[in-house]
Amino acid sequence: MDIIVNVLALCYEIWCTRNNECFDGAEIDVAATVQKAQRSIVNFNNASIVLLEMLNGGPNLPIYDVHWTPPISG
């Protein structure tokens, strides 16, 4: 599965880079594209670990007390 995640992340970042070049005129930076793909892979793997822990009844993520307050008028 790791190879599939790696290939998909790289393909997605290449596609995004190509779109930025075609539609926004941005220059292609191969190193930045590869770095973005690597960050996506790390983020996916971390999210997968957390999800599997939650599904297996593992440690719960901390939930902080968050309260909504209305914005200042005006």
Image (cartoon, rainbow, N blue to C red):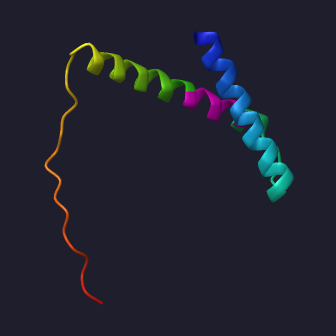
Residue shown at 38%/18% (left/top)?
Answer: 49
Point out residue 27 in the picture as x, y percentages from the top left corner. 83, 49
Is residue 65 positioned above or below 43 on the image?
Answer: below
Residue 10: name its quadrant.
top right
Q: Is residue 36 magenta?
A: yes
Where is the C terminus found, in terms of image quarters? Answer: bottom left
Point out residue 8 in the picture as x, y percentages from the top left corner. 67, 24
Residue shown at 60%/27% (left/top)?
Answer: 38
- Furthest toward the front, the residue is 55
Is residue 20 positioned above or below 58 on the image?
Answer: below
Relative side of 23 to 66, left or right: right
Residue shown at 18%/39% (left/top)?
Answer: 63
- The number of numbered discs placed on residues in the rendered structure image is 0
Where is the N terminus found, in terms of image quarters? Answer: top right
Residue 53: name its quadrant.
top left
SS majority, magenta: helix
Point out residue 72 in the picture as x, y percentages from the top left corner. 24, 82
Point out residue 69 in the picture as x, y percentages from the top left corner. 19, 69
- Furthest toward the bottom, the residue is 74
Viewer-closest of 50 and 39: 50
Relative side of 62 to 74, left or right: left
Q: Is residue 42 magenta?
A: no
Residue shown at 16%/59% (left/top)?
Answer: 67
Relative side of 6 to 20, left or right: left
Q: Which residues are magenta?
A: 33-40
Is residue 39 positioned above or below 48 on the image?
Answer: below
Residue 54: name its quadrant.
top left
